[in-house]
Structures are given as C-alpha cells and as structure tokens.
C-alpha cells in the first residue's frame, strides 16, 4: 500500500522541521510520499522543505489561506497515494508509526482510521497537562481517542487516515473548523464506509498552546458540536452535554453551600482530587498535576459555555450555523 502524508501548515516552519525529521527516522522499508500544503502563510517553510528533498519523497504547494480542511483536500487532490495519512504540523511521529498503521490495515482494513496522541518528555509542563486532560478517561479523552467503547469512533484530523476511494466519494473535509473531522466521519458512515481507532498508531501532539489559546480552542469545539447535532441528529448523544452540565452542577454545588448542603460540593472535590492524583501518577510531577486541574477547568468551562451558547443559537433561536457562528466557517 502506497501512503501519502498530507500536512497543512500555517506560519510554522519550525514545527514542520521537527515533523519531517521524525518522518526521516521512520522504521519502514516501503517508499512513502509527503505532501506539504502552505495555507497562505506569511512565514513560509519552503527553505525547510529543501533540507529534506534528498531524504524524503516530498512535494510542496503554496495556496491562499482557506483553512486546514480545504488545505488537506488540496493536498489529497495532488497526492499520488492510495491511502492518505493526515497530520497536524505540530505532531511528531514515533519510529514505528507506519508499521502499526500497515499492520492494522492489513489485519482489518477500513477506509478511515484515527489514532491517539501522547506527550514527549521535551514538551512544556502546560503542554503535558493539556495533553493529560485531553486524553484522560476522567475528562473527555475516551471520546477523543483513548477508547473505542463510546459508539462509532470519530477520527480526529491531527492523526487520521483516509483512503483515496473514501476521499473521492466524500469529497473530503467541509469548511467548518473545528468540527470538520467528525463531520467527515459521519458523512463517511452515511456513504457506507467504516472507521476505527488504531491505538498503537499514536503521535506526539505538541499543541502549540497557552491557557488563552486552549480556552479559545475548546470553546470552538463546544460551539461546533450543536451544529453537527443539527446536521446529523441521528448521531447526537447526551454525552456531548457533559461539560455543560458539569459546569452548571459545579455552580449549583457552590450555591447549595449557603443552604448547608455540602454533599454535592464534596463530590466535586473528590473528582478533582482523583484527577490530581491520576495526573501525578502518570506524570510524576506536582506542577503538572496542578496544571492538569487548571486545564480541566478551561476544558469543561470553555467547551461547556461554547456548547450552551451554540445550542441556544441553533435550536432555540433557530439561526443558521453560518449566521450564528461565522468564526467557525472558512470561505473557500
């Protein structure tokens, strides 16, 4: 099977350098292709690409800015492979990545897969804490890629595989962002294609982020979900309400303290203690464990607030998604 890596980039030449170096070090005997799509960057990575011309089968395209989904589509339209491996530019691959992908597809072929993410030791403490909360079963990690137990698995585009056949049938990603990856997964299901999680095909996801950027990111995730629920009501789930209900419940637990009802607040304290201890065990670092509580707060509050606002706009006020949240849509 001939693989094509599809990697959009926007003003991040240093990230592309790290990612390409990890591709050079892949333990894989068969030739593969790398397609870099510069999405209208003002800080280009063309000079970085030149460093790898002799080490990788690599092609580089520059196009006007139209968002990551459209850039991935552009890359797949110009790629030679029969199976596309879609990565974010802030990822680094372990050496066995392609072997795990090939082994899983040879064992049980699907036209679309997703893989989880992990943190490298070199990542900052905030990056490690955010990685923990985004992947932990105590938060929403099971839904994102740590488990396949919750219904059909929806791959995420930071680490996703897509066959050329599925791309041609679906026409690839839509113009919503974020939310373009679950949107594509659902459209693939409706076309009869299958998806799955390949647990061992993980990437190290750097997440170029600080607390403010993390809040903005998860807030947009929350806003996108009611739009997807509106488009595909058959795939709507109560679990998507969890962050919103968690936040509202926490506010209520504080109000109940004024009426000497402590039990609900104590339950929240137990939850945060469990989260702190689990992070401490996994990361073996008190600072990261504390940061994990901060990350969980941003994750639940940002997503929950975005979800609630979007739900009211879409389902109560009956606004069109593009009118209610134009910040989620790229104009191609």
Image: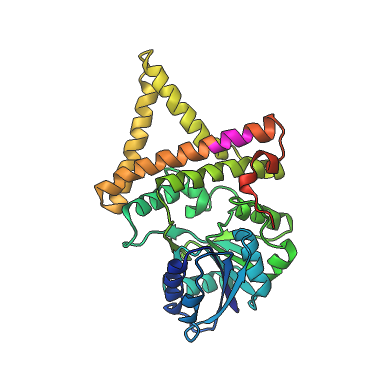
What range is drawn magenta here? Answer: 306-311
Q: Quadrant of the C terminus?
A: bottom right
Rendered view: 307 above or below 181: above
Q: Position of residue 179 (x, y in %)?
A: 60, 50
Please identify the dominant SS of the magenta region.
helix
Q: Is residue 307 magenta?
A: yes
Residue 191, picture quadrant: bottom right
Q: Is residue 146 left or right of residue 126?
A: right
Residue at the extreme front of the image, as rendered: 42
Q: Is residue 261 left or right of residue 319?
A: left
Towards the viewer: 210 or 305: 210
| Residue 111 visible here | no
Residue 187, picture quadrant: bottom right
Tally of numbered tags: 0
User: Which residue appears at 46% of the width and 49% of the height?
Assistant: 141
Towards the viewer: 193 or 4: 4
Q: Is residue 32 left or right of residue 274?
A: right
């Amino acid at each position: 099977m001939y693989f094509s890596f599809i990697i959009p980039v926007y003003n991040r030449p240093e990230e592309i350098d790290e990612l390409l170096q990890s591709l050079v070090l892949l333990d894989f005997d068969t030739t593969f292709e790398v397609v870099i799509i510069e999405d209208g960057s003002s800080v280009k990575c063309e000079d970085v690409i030149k460093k790898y011309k002799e080490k990788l089968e690599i092609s580089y395209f520059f196009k006007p800015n139209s968002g990551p989904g459209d850039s991935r589509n552009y890359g797949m339209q110009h790629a030679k492979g029969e199976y596309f491996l879609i990565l974010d530019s802030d990822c680094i691959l372990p050496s066995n990545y392609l072997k795990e992908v090939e082994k899983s597809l040879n064992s049980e072929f699907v036209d679309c897969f997703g893989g989880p993410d992990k943190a490298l030791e070199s990542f900052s403490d905030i990056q490690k804490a955010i990685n923990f909360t985004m992947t932990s079963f105590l938060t929403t990690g099971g839904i994102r890629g740590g488990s396949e137990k919750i219904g059909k698995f929806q791959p995420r585009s930071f680490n996703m595989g897509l066959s050329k056949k599925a791309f041609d049938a679906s026409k690839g990603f839509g113009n919503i962002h974020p939310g373009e990856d679950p949107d594509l997964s659902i459209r693939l299901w409706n076309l009869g294609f299958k998806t799955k999680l390949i647990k061992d095909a993980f990437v190290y996801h750097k997440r170029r982020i600080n607390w403010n950027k993390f809040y903005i990111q998860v807030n947009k995730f929350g806003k996108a979900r009611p739009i997807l629920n509106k488009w595909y009501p058959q795939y709507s789930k109560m679990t998507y309400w969890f962050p919103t209900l968690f936040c509202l419940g926490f506010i209520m637990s504080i109000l109940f303290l004024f009426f000497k009802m402590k039990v609900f607040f104590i339950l929240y304290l137990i939850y945060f203690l469990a989260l702190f201890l689990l992070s401490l065990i996994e990361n073996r670092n008190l600072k990261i464990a504390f940061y994990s509580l901060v990350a969980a707060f941003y994750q639940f509050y940002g997503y929950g607030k975005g979800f609630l606002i979007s739900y009211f706009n879409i389902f109560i006020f009956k606004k069109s998604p593009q009118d209610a949240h134009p910040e989620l849509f790229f104009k191609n």
